[in-house]
Image: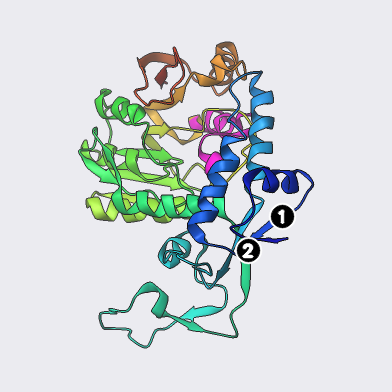
């Protein structure tokens, strides 16, 4: 159903609850105001069990995603809409009805991102949830600005869909824990590459970072090249070939189903990555090597995984706990009494 600036938030909410998608044709900034008004009528869940809150959050996302805006070749076709072409290209790839013009190959291209695409056919309009588009814009701004990581003394620039190191206490643990003797290290599930950069800066001659997410692999390569650190990125599922003296992993902390692309860095259904890591890491460890598992105890506070289960997984992988270092998260969204730990395994 097409709607515009004349609709009220209460009217919009009633239509959405009836299963109607709202195709916005009015002013862009008024659409943002309507989305904010809908959000105020759907407060974020704060009570009930974890699963109840997740269901409430899923319902909230479904309602807010019902407000759609028109886009043609990564441009919002609304009054007062900003140029979002670069942000959308980073998130979605090239516009669907264009290809990149290579006529300036070998020279500096001074055209805007919008001008670098050549139409293939008559452009078509698609409708995108405004909430999603605002997330794309925010991700682009964060990528440009970067996230300062104190343990590295540098900024890391996350790509869309890659977990940003805003909770940097795990980086502090890797930067401060005594290194084992050896010349090789693996950083599994590297994301932005921040831990690989820290390991390399600490003097490990050969660092290999892996991730099975193409976005993350590209992001890590870009960050490591910018930082000029000696680390290799491989797009693979967990383990690279061969063995290492030190294997580091910071898996998603919450064993639950992701609801969005961004959730995948935090939510890991049935602890699949954690289980696969602990089950296979011993085969990739050199004699006398060490494993550093970085993990928040948030799952324990949410009654999703017990400490006994974690210790059982460690023992099942043929490993033993050689030590543990804890740190209190500084992030404002951290839970009360939450602790992030570096589990030192051998």
Q: Is residue 113 above or below residue 159?
A: below
Query: Which residue appears farthest toward the right when viewing the image?
Result: 18
Q: Nearer the viewer, mark 1 or mark 2?
A: 1
- In whole angstroms, how far apart are the C-alphas of marks 1 and 2? 10 Å
Disc on res. 49: none
The secondary structure type at the circle numbered 2 is strand
Residue 162 position, x and y percent, is 45, 46
Task: Identify the image quadrant of residue 85.
Answer: bottom left
Q: Give coordinates of residue 70: x percent, y percent.
A: 59, 66
Q: Quadrant of the C terminus?
A: top left
N-term-proximal mark, 1 vs 2: 1
In magenta stretch: residue 269: yes
Q: On the rendered image, what quadrant is the N terminus found in?
A: bottom right
* Residue drawn where x is 55% and y is 24% of the image: 317
In front of the other: 218 or 7:
7
Residue that appears at 52% across and 55% down = 30
- Residue 264 forms part of the magenta stretch: yes
Disc 1 to disc 2: CB gap under 8 Å: yes
Callout 1: SS = loop
- In the drawing, does residue 174 fall left or right of residue 189? left
- Residue drawn 34% across the image and 23% down it: 330
Of the pair 321 and 62, the residue shown nearer to us: 62
Residue extending furthest toward the bottom: 103
The residue at the point 70 percent across, 47 percent down is 11
Question: Is residue 234 in view from this perspective?
Answer: no
Label at residue 127: 2
Residue 218 on image: x %, y %:
41, 56
Mark 2 is surrounded, within 10 Å at the Cα level, by few (under 14), some (14 to 19) or many (20 or more) other residues, namely some
Which range is magenta? 262-281
Q: How many marks?
A: 2
Residue 220: % across, % down? 37, 50
Residue labelled with disc 1: 21
């Amino acid at each position: 159903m097409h709607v515009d600036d004349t609709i009220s938030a209460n009217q919009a909410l009633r239509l959405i609850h009836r299963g109607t998608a709202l195709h916005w044709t009015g002013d862009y900034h008024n659409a943002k105001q309507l989305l904010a008004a809908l959000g105020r009528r759907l407060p974020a869940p704060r009570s009930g069990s974890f699963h109840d809150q997740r269901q409430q959050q899923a319902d909230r996302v479904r309602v807010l995603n019902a407000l759609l805006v028109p886009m043609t070749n990564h441009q919002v076709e609304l009054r007062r809409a900003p140029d979002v072409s670069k942000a959308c290209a980073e998130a979605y790839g090239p516009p669907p009805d264009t290809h990149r013009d290579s006529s300036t190959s070998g020279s500096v291209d001074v055209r805007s991102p919008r001008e670098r695409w050549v139409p293939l056919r008559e452009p078509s309009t698609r409708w995108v949830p405004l909430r999603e588009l605002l997330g794309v814009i925010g991700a682009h701004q964060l990528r440009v600005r970067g996230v300062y990581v104190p343990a590295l003394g540098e900024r890391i620039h996350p790509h869309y869909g890659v977990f940003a190191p805003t909770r940097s206490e795990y980086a502090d643990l890797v930067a401060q824990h005594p290194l084992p003797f050896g010349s090789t290290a693996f950083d599994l599930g590297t994301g932005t590459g921040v831990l690989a950069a820290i390991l390399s800066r600490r003097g490990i001659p050969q660092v290999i970072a892996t991730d099975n997410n193409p976005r993350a692999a590209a992001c890590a390569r870009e960050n490591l090249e910018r930082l000029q650190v000696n680390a290799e990125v491989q797009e693979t599922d967990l383990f690279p070939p061969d063995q290492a003296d030190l294997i580091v992993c910071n898996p998603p902390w919450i064993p639950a189903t992701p609801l969005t692309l961004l959730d995948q860095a935090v939510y890991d259904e049935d602890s699949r990555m954690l289980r696969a890591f602990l089950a296979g890491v011993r085969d990739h460890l050199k004699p006398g090597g060490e494993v550093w598992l970085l993990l928040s105890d948030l799952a324990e506070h949410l009654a999703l995984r017990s400490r006994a289960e974690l210790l059982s997984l460690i023992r099942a992988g043929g490993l033993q706990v050689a030590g543990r270092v804890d740190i209190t998260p500084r992030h404002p969204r951290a839970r009360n009494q939450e602790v992030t730990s570096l589990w030192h395994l051998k």
